[in-house]
Image (cartoon, rainbow, N blue to C red):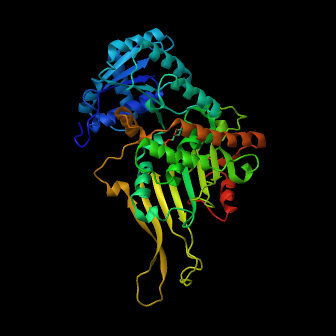
Amino acid sequence: MNTTQETFPDCDLVIYGGLGDLSRRKLLISLYRLEHGDFLEPGTRIIAVDRLEENTESYIKIAYQSLQSFLGSPVDEAVWEKLSVRLSYQQMDLMNPDEFKIFNEITDSSKRVMVNYFAVAPFLFKAICQGLEQSGVLTETSRMVMEKPIGHDLASSQEINDVVASVFQESQVYRIDHYLGKETVLNLLALRFANSIFTTNWDHNTIDSVQITVAEEVGIEGRWEYFDQTGQLRDMVQNHLLQILTFVAMEPPVNLKAQSIHNEKIKVLNALRPITLANVNETTVRGQYTDGFQKGTAVPGYLNEEGANTQSTTESFVALRVDIDNWRWAGVPFYLRTGKRLMNKRTEIVINFKQLPHNIFTESYKELPANKLVIHLQPNEGIEIQMLNKVPGIDENIKLQKTKLDLSFSETFKNSSLYGGYEKLVLEAMRGNPTLFISREEIEQAWSWVDSIQDAWSHANEEPKGYPAGSWGPVASVALLARDGRSWEE
Ligand code: BG6
């Protein structure tokens, strides 16, 4: 065990959908990395559940192949040996509640914590919840973990939450947004609340505007059916972008406990100015990629992807101007943009500070450029402050030049591994720390805000604006900021 960590009760991590994509691409990889870092408790067991006729021996082979395909580096045999003995497979028909009785034999919930990871489509949640309840295997210490899509609008997310709530208390439910496991998103808490220069300069008095960009290089990666019914607003804004926004905008929580953080996040979500038919045109841009080039390679447009519905008007790009109607952020727009098939993968937050009221350096700059804090979330995690300095020299008047204070995480923390989001969240779910998970209230508030945009779009009935794959999105997204006299950070 990693000796710097406290110890936790042994747990049985039961993964429903153990043969599915999520399990093979993400969960097994995370568990391997946790094993590699020596983070798993010695008694932790992993029980994969699925309907196909496999057994523990064949499942272990499948798990090994998944690591080979998705790990991105050679499998360390010593780590694998430790991980593989924790694995077992249970074939089950999730629709048959009687089959859940088996858990009374294979888990011991009086001594061990049962963590139920629902890595299956939400239509199966009800059957799993009922089966678990009837089996009598659940105790107060049992948990359930789920992740998006938690519905596709407020009503469907309430339905899912109600099903889960019929068996699990809210404190037993761990809703994952994998962005909250990302190192740099968590670092926002440290940046904002452990550094006095930022705690005192973080409101409408000093900040002009905020930009949050989550640009993706990938297209829809064979997920046409899911994506076409979802769109970028529901797929990325409702969850990841709004979560980042709450971390940037929230008031200082009284401590790091889950309830304190959830309370502050929900206040931000409640303060989001609604986007309705009345303001949708000035505050939103929808886009859809057309044929183009990425890094010199031709890529098909959204409507020309394999299996595409050529009439689809689903958006693969969204830009929004978001206003937070509270004391701290009055008059400070938050510009959000996210899209598929953009020029590169880049997730960043840009805090644009206000310009100074008077300029005494007119020889260098007619208008003094304002300071900027750029937080790079991925790739190349780090923080950069753009500021002005004097150009060294004795022979002239003071001449200014834009410079950067640059903190690259990979350079500064050379000896620490930067884990992806899943490792952190899977570990926290097993340890029973709910701080980084999303409460029901947050999910539902976020849906209700997003539903209003979706509703306004369907009434406005406008086609999405085209943008060539490999660009930074539709021209209209530039115009969205230009109207306010601003531009995107490029
Ligand atoms: C997922 C979305 O939640 O996040 C995908 O469903 C998206 O469409 C992905 O590509 C992006 O995650 P990351 O960690 O690669 O930025």
Residue 294 makes an appearance in the image: no
Residue 421, compared with residue 111, is above or below; it is below
Point 35% across, 47% down: residue = 418
The answer to whether 219 appears left or right of 3 in the picture is right
Q: Quadrant of the C terminus?
A: bottom right
Residue 71, compared with residue 266, is above or below; it is above
Q: Quadrant of the N terminus?
A: top left
Across and down, in percent, residue 469 comes to 61, 47
User: Please, which residue is most extreme toward the front here?
Assistant: 254
Q: Quadrant of residue 35?
A: top left
Point 60% across, 26% down: residue = 159
Point 72% across, 39% down: residue = 455
Point 49% across, 10% down: residue = 96
Residue 486 makes an appearance in the image: yes
The answer to whether 187 appears left or right of 450 in the picture is left
The tally of labels here is 0
Across and down, in percent, residue 386 comes to 47, 67
Residue 296, compared with residue 392, is above or below; it is above
Across and down, in percent, residue 175 comes to 48, 34
Across and down, in percent, residue 207 comes to 55, 64
Frontmost residue, 243 versus 418: 243
Frontmost residue, 27 versus 300: 27
